[in-house]
Image (tube, rainbow, N blue to C red):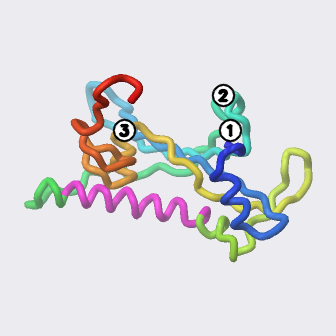
Amino acid sequence: MWTGGFWNAAQSAIPEGGTVAPVIIASDKTQLTQFSGNKAAYPVYLTIGNLPKSLRRKPKMRACVLIAYLSVDKISKGGISKTELRLRNYELFHRSMAVVLEPLKAAGNPKGGGVEMVGGDGAVRRVYPILAAYVADYPEQCLVSCTKYGMCPKCRRRADELELPTPGE
């Protein structure tokens, strides 16, 4: 991650002597029961891009931290359209994530002074945690980007517009 243009741009935006801590958020709604109860959980995890990918991806390294559980409650359909229901679900998700990420937003503000943290080498540094990536499956990407299912959450194209005429084009 530290070889990308994002990192250089983020580092140049913070005060001299500061260190960027690129934060990676991941979430995935998970069914806990198969045949009875219809129980679900919606965990949100955090890791940082300063760690090498080979360490970040190993569960035994404990590089990912559970930071929240989002609501899995259903919104009452009480006489509203499918579009309105979808928009309310988007709003519930986004308001919940705003609450979860508010401390990160405050800590990463270049005008706020960052946060003092002790590094792996024992040195104290002024760190600016900045949201760098959000890892999600396709339905989650649609939710995060407020994109209708079947559209590309990155470029806003419909599924039938994404097909390439020949491989490699």
| Residue name at image x 76 percent, y 60 percent | 127
- How crowded pointer 3 is (Cα within 10 Å; few <14, some 14-19, many 20+) is rated as some
| Residue name at image x 37 percent, y 56 percent | 93
- How crowded pointer 2 is (Cα within 10 Å; few <14, some 14-19, many 20+) is rated as few
User: For the residue marked with disc 1, what is the amino acid?
Assistant: Ala
**Does residue 140 appear left or right of residue 54 in this picture?**
left
1, above or below 79, in the image: above
- Dot 3: what SS? helix
| Residue name at image x 69 percent, y 76 percent | 111
Q: Does the segment drawn in magenta span residue 96?
A: yes
Q: Position of residue 88 (x, y in %)?
A: 26, 60
Res 63 label: 1
Label 2, on which residue?
58
Q: Position of residue 143 (x, y in %)?
A: 34, 50
User: For the residue marked with disc 2, what is the amino acid?
Assistant: Lys
Q: Position of residue 129 (x, y in %)?
A: 67, 58
Label 3, on which residue?
138
- Dot 2: what SS? loop
Quarter placement of the N terminus: top right
- Dot 1: what SS? loop
Of the image marks 3 and 2, the number of the one nearer the N terminus: 2
Extreme-right residue of the structure: 122
The range drawn in magenta is 85-104
Do callouts 2 and 1 mark residues in contact (Cβ within 8 Å)? yes
